[in-house]
Image (cartoon, rainbow, N blue to C red):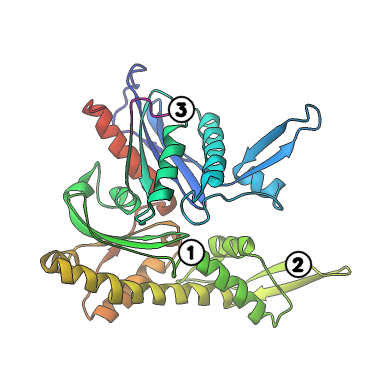
Amino acid sequence: MLDEEMETEEELDEENPVPVGVKLGSTRTVVVQPKGNVVRTHEALTCLATYQDVLSEKRRAVYGEEAANEYPERVQFMLRSGLPEDDERAETAATFFDKFTSANGVSENSVVVYAIPTIDNEGGLTNLASVIEESGIGSQLIRSYPESLCGSIPALGGGLDAINRIFIAINMGSTNLEACAYRRGEQLSRFSTGSVTGNEVDRWIANNVEEETQGRVNIDQTTAREYKEEHGDLENFKPFTDIIQQPGGGTHEFTIERSVVDALDRYVNETVDEIANEFLPQLANRYIKIYKQTLEEPIVLTGGMACIPGLLEAFENRLSTELQHEVTVTAPEEPVTAAARGAQRIAEQFVEEETF
């Protein structure tokens, strides 16, 4: 859990609404809110599992890491595609979000800003809005802003400096690669693809492990994601060992030398190709002056893949080579929580200006 000191040491007036930032994500959900004179960040895996209480025989639900660890055979990651696609997933997401916000004491008397993906999916976005709006929080105001914009706010100075700048943001998420140019908060030339994603990296790792071990080891994508998060490093990767139980008894110890880093290397190459040959030409064709200006400004990387050590530097070098133009790339601290932290700053502005 991440705590940040608030700019003011004064206790919040209980009569004022609480400014809350939310990112309901495909892999992790983050809520950011002030508690006393600190801002607290709460995280959980976006998943839910139900079970029958042996005493009352009622159906109960657990969420997050507890659900994933205790009920791996039936845990539901209801936002695997990035949004709740249908009524069933929306209902499951609502149950998860209610439990998560209740457990972390999110106030009903709040101004809530939540981050949304840059995807043309009206039905999914409508379902996501319903999950937030019907949750019981945000009684004073609920607003949504693009995830890549929210995630860029902590990367580009204090307060809401990013809202007054012209720059490119690239969101490296689990379910989509998104890019957008921003002009004082306005979205220009949005781009999104599901072909290069964090989930694809997990699949590549699983395939690579099978190949590297000559078929002796097969891992699922959840284990591949854990390998990526624990060992992924494009700068100082170190081989690691793991142990599996063999059919019929006994264990097999194996070492991974290339499976993880090769998948990450492929991800950077394919991401650079999408940005350099799809998104940037699209931006240049529509807004040539903005295109030229944004290449002289830092490009912001957000999303979970931006957490990988060495990825930012590799992306910067390879994009510069591809464009034959030196670009600068930056990322917020804690990219996984950055969108919710940026959303919370926007909510704080609404509260300070009493525009709710």
Residue 327 is a magenta residue: no
Would you name the residue on which mark 2 appears?
A: 244
Q: Residue at x 46, y 77 (%)?
A: 266
Would you name the residue on which mark 3 appears?
A: 136
Most common secondary structure along the magenta stretch? loop
- Image coordinates of residue 117 in percent, x first then y, are 38, 53
Residue reaching furthest to the right? 248
* Mark 3 or mark 2, earlier in chain: 3
Q: CA distance from mark 3 to mark 2?
A: 45 Å
Of 218 and 92, nearer the camera is 92
Q: Quadrant of residue 283?
A: bottom left
Label 3 with label 2: CB-CB less than 8 Å: no
Circle nearer the viewer, 3 or 1: 3
Please indicate whether residue 265 sits to the left or right of residue 74 in the image.
Answer: left
The quarter of the picture where the C terminus appears is top left
Please indicate whether residue 176 sits to the left or right of residue 223 in the image.
Answer: left
Is residue 284 visible to the viewer in this orientation of the structure?
A: yes
Q: Secondary structure at mark 3?
A: loop
Q: Is residue 313 above or below residue 66?
A: below
Amino acid type, callout 3: Gly
* Mark 2 or mark 1, earlier in chain: 1
- Image coordinates of residue 248 in percent, x first then y, are 89, 69
Amino acid type, callout 1: Gly
